[in-house]
């Protein structure tokens, strides 16, 4: 069977721009698993694909916007969330999902992340966290663990990494979850939940980077890394996000926040309605 | 500079309004695209009558709220905001910055009144990103800023160029570089507007010279952005932004607004970056069922990345530039005063052009044959027109509130005709007598 046939027969091929396959990601990379979880969630929820917009930034996972068969845009480095904010507010009927990496969302794009969370803009942000800038060959990112080796930390990393779960919670996200790409069913379930929830939702997917970060840090093959994820992951749903740091010996996973707050869009609509009512009253006088 | 409404200036405005009859408006633009309803101010009065008969005005009530028909006394920044709302702008993403803040303030109030969206973003990078997003989601969208914010926007201006997002960027120019003189005027961002983002590209930029034009040209900017799918800039100096003058806002049916061309094929056949004859691709918006992809990467007609092909890179970059260059005649707006027999021509734009108009009149009175070419469009630069004028005159004078920017373009096309720069930095615009002196010197 030809490659094209294999691609066309894939259960999720109707959600993909199959002409773009094969994708650019390395063998063993977690991005494919994450994409699979996202598409399965769309499939499960039977969401009208005409109303889904996928926005990505720059980096390996940034290419995801070109692979999904929805309206999609691949923006500048770090700006996906600001872009998504404009899309969602301009057309509230759309489900707007940002899928991007740790460097894109939390270094160059960190300001947009905290402010969109604070405003509670109704967008879903999914972060593929592979602990480094893979596309440019493995430099340290805001999530690189202390002491890790990257091409720009040749003596080991001395910068303390972000605990993304804690950051998202503090900034005001209404839904915060972290899984690894080993937790396929739970990751998919969290994406489904976020897609159905109003407000700024954040899901971190800890992901292997076998060709770059994992190789530099002698973590073994992609399978070894998945085994390592299994060994050190602890489901700690509901635990204090400030205690959910990722360390050498533990990855705290689970749902950390699930609260209700009116979204920015809702507050904007309510304000607009009030103003419209007042204008009507004024003109009636 | 807010107190710039001296009687001299008022007089010069009334002169200017008379001379708008001379404005060279390219009517072809209007017949080529979806004209929904008709016109802004004086230059369009005649077009409006005929087009009106063909177009029904929809949703008059909303329109009335969007268009504050009547005569007003307002600042340039406020007139710009009113022009935007009248043009159909329903999304504004911005960040406060002197001297453009009043535009944000006005938009925050007015957009809610017309069921639009105003958002104050975390910075100018986010502002323009949100505006590109809103444009792709189908709204007419705008941001307004000044020098430092304009610098921050440059990377995403490139994205807007590459993804061909129709949008308007207003830059109320203040003194630079860096923080410079925030409350003082300049025309120092003329070159940045054209060359600020990396790579080869073209944009459109208009320069208003009165508060009335802040209203009119903001509408023009939206129309040009929608027709050519290009970020379109309103470059106003701080004097124009903060000056208060009389503004006539016409009735809604007399305002021309143009919408982007929609695809004429079914979603399955839609190629999002396949251009029509005028090199501009019809534009679907998110949520309309076309399910297309846009990217800042070099892309083919299907919108899909092509990161190594020489052919795709060449074709795309050429088209992004040529869609503006080849349509330059339709885009260009200039105003000629006493050019025909002139021996010296002053080429000016923005506030400077008002001093220049006064100067050529004074010069004529003392027997000097001077004329004025006022550029309303600075980008694309009207090079053919300037070249043809240069061939006929003895000298060209370019007064600018910078250390010499647009003068380089004039020199480039003037060839052997001598070109003199009159540079001004800081608060004071040119005085007419300084320009008269330069005219006299050139004719010696």
Image (spheres, coloured by chain):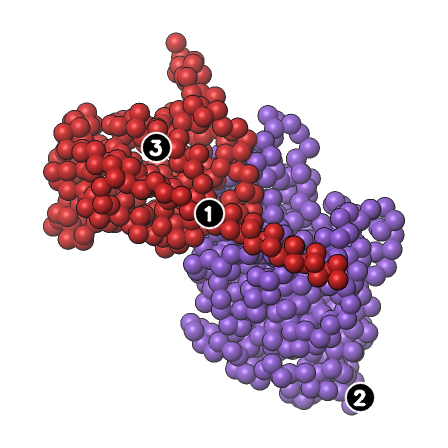
- Nearest the camera: A137 or A230? A230
Same chain letter for marks 1 and 2: no
**3D distance between C-alphas at marks 2 and 3:** 79 Å
Q: Quadrant of the N terminus of chain A?
A: top left
**3D distance between C-alphas at marks 3 and 1:** 19 Å
Badge 1: residue crowd in 10 Å (few <14, some 14–19, many ≥20): many
Q: Read off the residue under disc 1.
A: A263
The local secondary structure at tag 3 comes to helix
Q: Percent position (x, y) of residue B175?
A: 50, 76
Pair 2/3: label in front: 3
Residue at horizontal 24%, vertical 27%? A182
> Where is B158 relative to A128, above or below?
below
Q: Chain of mark 3?
A: A
Determine contact: label 2, label 3, CB under 8 Å.
no
The local secondary structure at tag 2 comes to helix
Chain B: drawing colour: purple
Q: Which mark is residue A190?
A: 3
> Where is A101 relative to B16, above or below?
above
Same chain letter for marks 2 and 3: no
Q: Which mark is residue B214?
A: none
Chain A: drawing colour: red
């Amino acid at each position: 069977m030809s490659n094209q046939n294999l691609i066309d027969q894939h259960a999720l091929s109707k959600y993909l721009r199959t002409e773009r396959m094969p994708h650019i990601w390395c063998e063993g990379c977690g991005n494919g698993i994450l994409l699979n979880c996202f598409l399965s969630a769309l499939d499960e929820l039977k969401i009208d694909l005409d109303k889904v917009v996928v926005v990505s930034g720059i980096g390996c996972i940034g290419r995801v916007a070109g692979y999904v068969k929805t309206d999609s845009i691949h923006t500048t480095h770090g700006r996906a969330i600001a872009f998504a904010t404009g899309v969602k507010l301009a057309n509230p009927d759309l489900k707007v999902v940002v899928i991007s990496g740790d460097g894109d969302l939390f270094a160059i794009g960190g300001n947009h992340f905290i402010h969109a969370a604070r405003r509670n803009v109704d967008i879903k942000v999914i972060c593929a966290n592979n602990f480094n800038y893979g596309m440019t060959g493995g430099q340290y990112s805001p999530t690189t663990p202390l002491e890790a080796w990257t091409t720009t930390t040749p003596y080991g990393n001395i910068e303390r990494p972000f605990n993304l779960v804690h950051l998202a919670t503090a900034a005001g996200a209404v839904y915060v979850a972290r899984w690894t790409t080993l937790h396929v069913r739970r990751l998919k379930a969290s994406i489904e939940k976020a897609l159905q929830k109003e407000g700024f939702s954040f899901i971190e997917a800890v992901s292997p980077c076998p060709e770059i970060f994992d190789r530099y840090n002698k973590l073994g093959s992609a399978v070894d890394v998945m085994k390592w994820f299994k060994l050190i992951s602890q489901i700690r749903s509901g635990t204090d996000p400030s205690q959910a740091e990722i360390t050498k010996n533990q990855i705290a996973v689970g749902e950390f926040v699930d609260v209700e707050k009116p979204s920015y869009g809702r507050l904007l609509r309510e304000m607009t309605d009030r103003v419209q009512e007042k204008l009507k009253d004024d003109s009636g006088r | 500079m807010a107190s710039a409404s001296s009687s001299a200036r008022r007089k010069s405005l009334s002169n200017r309004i008379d001379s708008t009859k001379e404005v060279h408006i390219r009517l072809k633009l209007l017949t080529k695209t979806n004209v929904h309803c008709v016109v802004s101010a004086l230059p369009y009065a005649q077009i409006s009558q005929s087009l009106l008969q063909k177009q029904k005005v929809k949703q008059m009530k909303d329109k009335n709220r969007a268009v504050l028909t009547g005569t007003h006394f307002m600042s340039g920044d406020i007139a710009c905001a009113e022009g935007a709302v009248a043009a159909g702008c329903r999304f504004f993403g911005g960040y406060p910055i002197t001297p453009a803040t009043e535009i944000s303030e006005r938009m925050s109030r007015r957009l809610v009144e017309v069921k639009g969206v105003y958002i104050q973003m975390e910075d100018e990078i986010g502002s323009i990103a949100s505006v590109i997003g809103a444009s792709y989601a189908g709204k007419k969208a705008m941001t307004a800023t000044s020098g430092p914010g304009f610098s921050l926007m440059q990377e995403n201006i490139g994205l807007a160029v590459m993804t061909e997002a129709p949008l308007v960027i207003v830059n109320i120019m203040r003194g630079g570089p860096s923080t410079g003189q925030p409350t003082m005027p300049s025309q120092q961002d003329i070159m940045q507007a054209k060359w600020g983002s990396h790579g080869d590209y073209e944009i459109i930029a208009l320069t208003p010279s009165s508060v009335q034009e802040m209203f009119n040209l903001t509408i023009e900017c939206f129309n040009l952005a929608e027709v050519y799918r290009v970020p379109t800039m309103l470059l106003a100096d701080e004097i124009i932004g903060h000056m208060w003058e009389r503004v006539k806002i016409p009735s809604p049916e007399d305002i021309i607004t143009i919408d982007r061309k929609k695809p004429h094929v079914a979603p399955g056949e839609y190629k999002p970056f396949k251009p029509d004859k005028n090199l501009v691709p019809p534009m679907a918006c998110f949520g309309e069922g076309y399910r297309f992809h846009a990217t800042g990467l070099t892309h083919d007609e299907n919108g899909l990345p092509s990161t190594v092909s020489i052919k795709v890179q060449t074709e795309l970059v050429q088209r992004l530039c040529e869609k503006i260059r080849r349509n330059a005649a339709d885009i260009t707006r200039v105003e000629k005063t006493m050019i025909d027999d002139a021996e010296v021509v002053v080429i000016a734009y923005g506030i400077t052009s008002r001093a220049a108009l006064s100067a050529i009149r004074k010069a004529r009175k003392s027997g000097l044959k001077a004329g004025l070419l006022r550029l309303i469009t600075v980008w694309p630069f009207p090079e053919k027109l300037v070249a043809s004028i240069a061939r006929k005159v003895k000298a060209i004078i370019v007064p600018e509130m910078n250390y010499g920017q647009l003068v380089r373009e004039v020199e480039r096309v003037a060839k052997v005709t001598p070109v003199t720069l009159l540079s001004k930095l800081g608060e004071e615009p040119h005085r007419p007598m300084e320009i008269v002196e330069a005219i006299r010197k050139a004719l010696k």
